[in-house]
Amino acid sequence: MNIKNLKPQKVWEYFERICQIPHISLHTDEITQYLKTELERLGYSPYVDKANNIFVTKPAYAGYEKLPTVLLQGHSDMVGSKDPLSKHDFLKHPIQTMIDKGWIYANKTTLGADNGIAVAIIMAIFADRSLKHGPLEALITADEEIGMVGIQAFDMNKIHAKYMINLDNEDDKEVCIGCPGNIDIEAELFFKRETKKKPDTSNLRIEVIDGIGGHSGQTIGQKRINAIKEIFNVLTFIHNEYPILLISVDKSGVAKNNIPYECAADINVNNKDITKIKEIVAHEWKMIQEEYHLEKNIKIICKPSQTKLLPISPKNSDLIIGVYAGVPNGVQTFNWKYNVPETSSNLGLIETKTHSIWAKFMVRSSYDQAQKRYANRIKTLFNSVGGKAKQTAFVSGWLPKENKLADIYENFYKKIFKREAKQVLINGGVEPAFVLSKKPDMLGISIGPLMQEVHTKNERLNVESTQKIYNLLVKFLPTLK
C-alpha cells in the first residue's frame, strides 16, 4: 500500500512529501523552502526568519472568531541515524518509507516521524478550509534536535496565542505537561604523542558495534549501552591489569541527544599481554549479554589495529581513559511521582582531533538547578585536570503544574474514548519548555501519535494512532474557550 493512500489522506500526502526532502538538523533550507512555497500556494503569508523557523496564521472559521487563538507547533528537522551497512546519505537521499502491520518505518534509517508527522498534521489542518476552529497560529521550528536552536532565535513577540499545542509527544494515550530542559557541554582533553612506538608492542582495536542506541531522553532509563562509555569501561578493565597506551578513539555518535550505538578505540599494548587482553574483552562482552537484555546484537571485538598513529603519552593516556570512564552518564535522579527519569546526562559525541579528544554532552532535568549541578560536575572534572569544558546551550525545564488546558484535553479525550489521557512528565525535551518560559501566561500541552525507537534505525510510527490524534485534534480545537 502507498502511504499517500492512508487516511487522513492529506496528512500522509504531506508526510510522504516531507520524507522525500533531506532535512536533518542544520540542513533544513530545502524543507523550509518547500513548506513556505506550499503555504503560499494555499493562500497564506508565512513568515520565515534567518533560523529557518516558519510562522503562519490561519483565520477562524466563520462564526468561531471569538474563540481563543491556539498555537500549533512542531519542528522540521530530524535526527539522521542509520544501520552501519546502509549507504543512505541524509544530505541527498529521500527516506524510503515502508508499511508493515500498521506501522510506518524506513529502510535501515530513522524515519523522521519525530517530528515530520507534526509538520504534516499542521499542514493538513492549514490546507483544509472546511475545518471549524478559532484563530490559529503555527510555528514550525528548525534545528530542534540539536538543543532547540531554532526556537531560541525566534521572535516570541509574534506569538499571541492563549494556548499552545505541541505535537512532539510520542504516545496518543498521554498528554505531556512537563519535560526537562537541557544544557549542552563541549569538552576536550589534550594530549601529546610518543615520538616512537616501543619495541615488543602491538596495536589493538577495540570495537563496540551493533548497539541499539536510542533517544537520550525517552530511552535513557532503559538498559541500553552507550557505546562511547562502554569503550572506556573496557579500557579501564584492561588498564587495571596491564599497561596500555591510548592511540585514538573513532569519531562516534549521531547527535548529543542520541545514545551512541557504536564506537572504537585503538590502543598500544605489550605483545606478552595480548592473549589476556583478548580474554578480558571477551569476558566483558559475555557479561554485557547477560546484563543488558535489550541489546540483542551488540558485540565487543578485539582485533589488530591498522592505525599508523603513534601512541599517546602514558600520563595523557591514563588521564583520558580515567576521565571519560568516570564522567557522569545516564540517569542521575528519578521522579517517583511521575515514574520517569528526572535528571540525566548523555555522552553523545566523541572525536579524536590533532591534539585532543573532544566530546559533547547533553544534561537534562526538569529542574534548572539540577541541570546546572550535573553540568558543573562535568565541566569541573575536565577543567580540574587541565582540559577544557564549556556550556554551549541552555533551555529551562518545564515543570508540571496545574494546567487548565491539560484538564480540558483530558476530559475531552475521556468523552471520546471512555478513558483518561494520562498527564505525564516526560524525559525528552519538547519546545513548550522554551516557549512557556518566555510566555508565562500561556498554557501548553504536548500530544502526538504513537512512535517507537525514535532516533534509531528502528524508528516506527503507528498508522491508526496518527489517524486518532489528527481526528481528535480537529474535533478538539473548536471546543476551546
Image (spheres, rainbow, N blue to C red):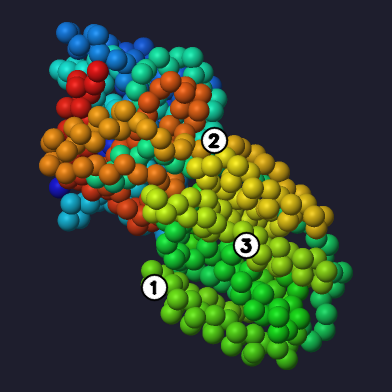
What is the tally of numbered marks visible in this picture? 3
Residue picked out by circle 3: 250
User: Within 10 angstroms of label 3, few (less than 14), some, or many (20 or more) residues?
Assistant: some
Query: Of helix, strand and loop, which one carries label 1?
Result: loop
* Image coords of residue 254 (percent x, y): 52, 52
**Dots 3 and 1: beta carbons under 8 Å?**
no
Look at discs 3 and 2 and give the one toward the viewer. Answer: 2
* Residue 126 higher or lower than 341, as above or below: above
Question: Mark 3 to mark 2: distance in Å?
Answer: 33 Å
N-term mark: 3 or 1: 3
Please state if 202 lies on the left or on the right of 230 as rendered. Answer: right
| Location of the C terminus (image quadrant) | top left
Please state if 198 lies on the left or on the right of 409 as rendered. Answer: right
Look at discs 3 and 1 and give the one toward the viewer. Answer: 1
Question: Mark 2 to mark 1: distance in Å?
Answer: 34 Å
User: Within 10 angstroms of label 1, few (less than 14), some, or many (20 or more) residues?
Assistant: few
Query: Of helix, strand and loop, which one carries label 2?
Result: loop
* Residue 227 higher or lower than 285, as above or below: above
User: Within 10 angstroms of label 2, few (less than 14), some, or many (20 or more) residues?
Assistant: many
Mark 2 belongs to which amino acid? Answer: Ser
* Image coords of residue 391 (percent x, y): 67, 41
- What residue is drawn where x is 17% and y is 27%? 475
Please state if 143 lies on the left or on the right of 127 as rendered. Answer: right
Residue picked out by circle 2: 396
Mark 3 belongs to which amino acid? Answer: Asp
